[in-house]
Image (cartoon, helix red, strand yellow):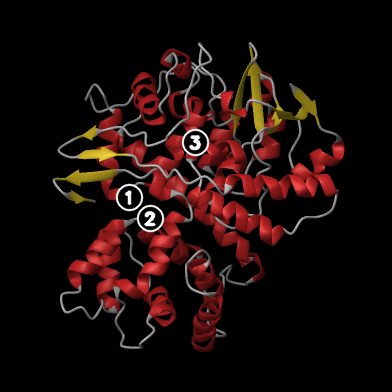
């Protein structure tokens, strides 16, 4: 059964319509394979990776927040009134953090492709950004089942590209959008590579290089991703799927291109840069003559999804404002390099732990050295001063793991990274 929604509902959905907006029943079947049989995806699904270490993917099973988000959306649609955007953003943030990957994908997807009565939800690159960026207001998800139906020609059309492209020059996500939309397999891969620390990309690449010849071909890529995503259908169809913008971009429409380690790493760098640039632009750097954002804006972004009470956040930000009011601000390069350190995940915590032999915390100089080791990036002394001013509560000129925890852990969890990053186990040690 399919119900066609009217224009008012379409406008509420905030969707870029090229066909019709629909609400479909039996949403759990949108991933159907040839036999129309496919169980819930990524419920504890993992794939073992071997290269002197074992890796696994772990997924959250807490998706009770999803009905609340959809209820808010439906209430708004039924009333025909404007919804509270702040409340919606908070609900979407909870979904990113606690929802399963398959629920997140379906909630933020805009499009649906129907063939032989089988329905498949598809994402644009805007949808992907919204699915991994807490606080995003680029667009909003409209819930499972509310999609724009597209044909194969529309998926790769110039009109769809112009509607969905991101406001970034030379963007890898825009290059993917030019080649098509994102399937569920594409989404899982992008989230995995986005959340895996740089130092473990070699291990991740070896997992995809099944033949161990130094290159990853389309068939190898699909073979591994099908295992990760729990796909039970014909993998040959995934290899030749013309809808997949990621497959078309990485391997060409004729699937003759290959991935090598350098291209694999470059792809991650470009993907991270796209996400960070869009987040940086939220704070209006174009209004500043140096195209910088203020130190307070930078710290507001750091604390956005932290577990720190709002009154304490305000106190911390006031301290930063007092010290740095009227200064040069934070450039995108500084912003980006610091966040590359946060993308390092547990490596950062581990490095701070081992350097903190006297349990006093790390100094500014030690933090800069840690950043260089974790992310292979030089972070500026200015950024370190800002971070220490924000988080060094006792003013002892040392930053402890306890003081840094609210930023590090909540930052990764708020994006759902704990569901998808590569985990390496060496005996009882998990890194």
Image position, residue 217 (x, y; %): 35, 22
Pointer 3 local density, CA inside 10 Å: few below 14, some 14–19, many at least 20: many
Ranked by sequence position, the earlier of labels 1 and 2 is: 1
Q: Which mark is residue 100?
A: none
**Which quadrant would residue 289 be assigned to in this image?**
bottom right
Figure check: 74 above or below 147: below
Q: Is residue 312 visible?
A: yes
Disc 2, SS: loop
Residue carrying label 1: 197
Disc 1 from disc 3: Cα separation: 18 Å
Q: Residue at x 49, y 88 (%)?
A: 323
Horizontal side of 242 relative to 153 (left or right) equals left
**137, 428: nearer the viewer:** 428
Residue carrying label 2: 343
For the residues bearing labels 1 and 3, Cβ distance under 8 angstroms: no
Figure check: 405 above or below 45: below
For the residues bearing labels 1 and 2, Cβ distance under 8 angstroms: yes
Pointer 1 local density, CA inside 10 Å: few below 14, some 14–19, many at least 20: many
Image position, residue 382 (x, y; %): 41, 77
Disc 3 from disc 2: Cα separation: 18 Å
Q: Which mark is residue 187?
A: 3
Disc 1, SS: loop
Disc 3, SS: helix
Q: Is residue 169 visible?
A: no
**77, 150: nearer the viewer:** 77
């Amino acid at each position: 059964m399919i119900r066609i929604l009217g224009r008012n509902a379409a406008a509420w959905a905030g969707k870029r319509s090229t066909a019709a907006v629909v609400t479909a029943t039996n949403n759990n079947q949108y991933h159907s394979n040839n036999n129309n049989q496919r169980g819930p995806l990524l419920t504890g699904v993992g794939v073992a990776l071997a290269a002197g270490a074992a890796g696994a993917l772990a997924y959250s099973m807490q998706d009770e927040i999803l009905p609340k988000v959809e209820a808010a959306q439906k209430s708004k649609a039924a009333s025909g009134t404007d919804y509270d955007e702040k409340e919606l953003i908070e609900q979407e943030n909870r979904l990113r953090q606690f929802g399963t990957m398959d629920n997140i994908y379906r909630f933020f997807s805009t499009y649906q492709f129907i063939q032989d009565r089988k329905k498949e939800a598809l994402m644009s690159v805007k949808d992907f950004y919204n699915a991994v960026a807490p606080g995003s207001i680029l667009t909003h998800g409209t819930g499972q089942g509310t999609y724009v139906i597209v044909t194969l020609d529309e998926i790769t059309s110039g009109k769809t590209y112009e509607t969905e492209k991101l406001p970034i020059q030379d963007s890898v996500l825009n290059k993917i959008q030019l080649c098509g939309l994102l399937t569920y397999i594409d989404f899982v891969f992008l989230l995995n590579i986005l959340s895996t620390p740089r130092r473990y990309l070699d291990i991740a690449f070896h997992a995809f290089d099944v033949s161990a010849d130094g290159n990853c071909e389309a068939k190898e890529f699909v073979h591994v991703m099908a295992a990760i995503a729990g796909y039970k259908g014909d993998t040959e169809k995934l290899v030749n799927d013309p809808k997949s913008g990621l497959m078309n971009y990485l391997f060409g429409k004729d699937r003759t291109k290959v991935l090598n380690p350098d291209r694999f790493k470059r792809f991650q760098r470009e993907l991270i840069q796209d996400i960070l640039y869009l987040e940086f632009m939220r704070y209006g750097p174009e209004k500043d003559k140096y195209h910088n954002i203020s130190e307070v804006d930078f710290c507001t972004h750091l604390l956005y999804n932290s577990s720190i009470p709002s009154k304490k956040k305000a106190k911390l930000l006031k301290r930063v404002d007092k010290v740095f009011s009227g200064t040069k601000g934070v450039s995108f390069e500084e912003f980006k390099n610091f966040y590359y350190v946060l993308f390092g995940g547990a490596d950062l915590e581990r490095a701070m732990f081992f350097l903190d032999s006297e349990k006093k915390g790390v100094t500014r100089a030690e933090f800069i050295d840690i950043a260089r080791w974790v992310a292979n990036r030089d972070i500026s002394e200015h950024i370190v001063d800002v971070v220490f001013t924000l988080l060094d509560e006792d003013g002892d000129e040392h930053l402890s793991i306890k003081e840094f925890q609210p930023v590090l852990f909540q930052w990764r969890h708020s994006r759902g990274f704990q569901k998808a990053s590569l985990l390496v186990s060496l005996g009882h040690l998990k890194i």
